[in-house]
Amino acid sequence: MRLVEIYQCLCDETRLRLLNLLQAGPLCVCHLQEVLDMGQVAVSKHLGYLRRHGLVTATREGKWRIYRLVEPAPPELRRHLACLQDCTREIPLFCEDQRRLAARLQDCCPSGPRAGTREPSAIHFRTKPNP
Amino acid sequence: MRLVEIYQCLCDETRLRLLNLLQAGPLCVCHLQEVLDMGQVAVSKHLGYLRRHGLVTATREGKWRIYRLVEPAPPELRRHLACLQDCTREIPLFCEDQRRLAARLQDCCPSGPRAGTREPSAIHFRTKPNP
DNA sequence: ACCTCATATTCTCTTAACGGAATATGAATG
DNA sequence: CATTCATATTCCGTTAAGAGAATATGAGGT
C-alpha cells in the first residue's frame, strides 16, 4: 500500500468519520449513514473509495453489507490509524459520532454496546437496522 | 489546524518529499528543486500550498527564500509528521532524497552535512546554492 | 414470480488540483 | 538604474473529486 494512497483516503472529512466509527468494530452501511446523517449515495461512495484503496473490506450478511477495517492492516496503515485515533479522541465531532453510534447500537442490540464486534452478523439478525 | 487540512497537505507525493527533506532542517527552494528534480513552478506551488495551510513558514534571506517546518507545530501536526517519518524511513524514494540532499549540502557547505540547521542563512551566504 | 429493502452504479454538474509556459516581483549587484 | 537571480503568480488545459438524482443489482420475504 502506497503512503500517498493512505493520505488520499484520509483527506476527506466524511471518510475520517467513517474510519473513526469503524475503529470500534464492523458496521453496516445504514448504521453509518444514520450516524453521519448523510445521503445513502455519499456514504456508499466513500465506503467504496476506502474499499478500492484497501483500507476496509466488505462482506454480505443477508441483505446488508458489512464494512470493517482491513485485517490484518499493513504496518503503515496501522500506524496512521493509531495516529488518527489519537487525534480524533479530542475532536468533538468524532466523539459525538461515537456517542450516536453507541446509542444506535443500544436500540439495535441491547445486550451490549458493541455486541456485534465478535459476531458482526449478530447486529443485523437480532433486530433490523431500520425497524 | 483542522485534521483534514493536514491530510490534504500530505496527500500529494511531491509534498511528502518536501516535508521529508524539511524534517532535517530549513532549506531554500533551489535546493529542494534540485533534489526533487522538478520544475521550479511545481516546487514553488507546493511550498506555497504547505505555507497557506500552516505546515511550513518562509523567510527571506537575501535573494533566497528559506522554508522550514512551522515551529512550534500544533500537536496533531507533530504526531502526523512523526508518523510520516516512521514510514518514510523505509521507503527508497525518500531515503534517496535525503542522500541527494546531504550530497548537495556537502558541495554547498563542506563544514558539515547540516551546517545550516542552526544558522539557516549560513547555507546561502557561504556559497551560492547554484554556483 | 413479484416486491421490498439495502446498497451500488451511472450520469451530470461543479469545483479543486496539478503541471507547464509565460510573466511578474523583489533583492542584490554592477 | 539596469540587469540578474531566486522565487511567486497567472493563465491554460487536463484530470480527479464530490454531491445529488435517477437507476440498477441482488438478497429475502410473500
Image (cartoon, coloured by chain):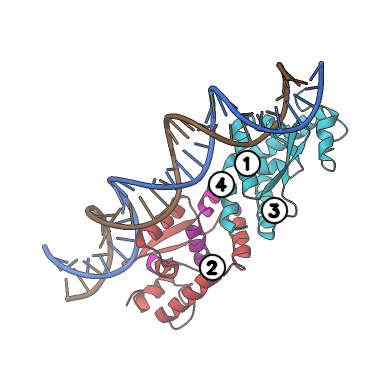
Chain colours: A red, B cyan, C blue, D brown
User: Which residue is identified by label 2?
Assistant: A93
Give the residue drawn at x 55%, y 71%. A95
Give the residue drawn at x 45%, y 74%. A116
Label for residue B82? Answer: 3
Report the predominant secondary structure element of the magenta stretch: helix
Badge 3 amino acid: Ala
Q: Earlier in the sequence, mark 4 or mark 3?
A: 4
Q: Earlier in the sequence, mark 1 or mark 3?
A: 1
Q: Residue furthest bottom?
A: A111
Chain letter for the residue marked with disc 3 in the picture: B
> Can residue B113 be seen by looking at this rendering?
no
| Label 1 environment density (alpha carbons within 10 Å; few <14, some 14–19, many ≥20) | some
Image coords of residue A17 (percent x, y): 50, 63
The alpha-carbon separation of the residues under discs 1 and 3 comes to 22 Å
The alpha-carbon separation of the residues under discs 1 and 4 comes to 15 Å
Badge 1 amino acid: Gly
The boundaries of the magenta stretch are A7-30
Closest to the observer: B27 or B86? B27
User: Which residue is identified by label 1?
Assistant: B48
In this picture, residue A129 sits left or right of residue D8: left
Image coords of residue D4 (percent x, y): 72, 19
Chain letter for the residue marked with disc 4 in the picture: B
Image coords of residue B91 (percent x, y): 64, 42
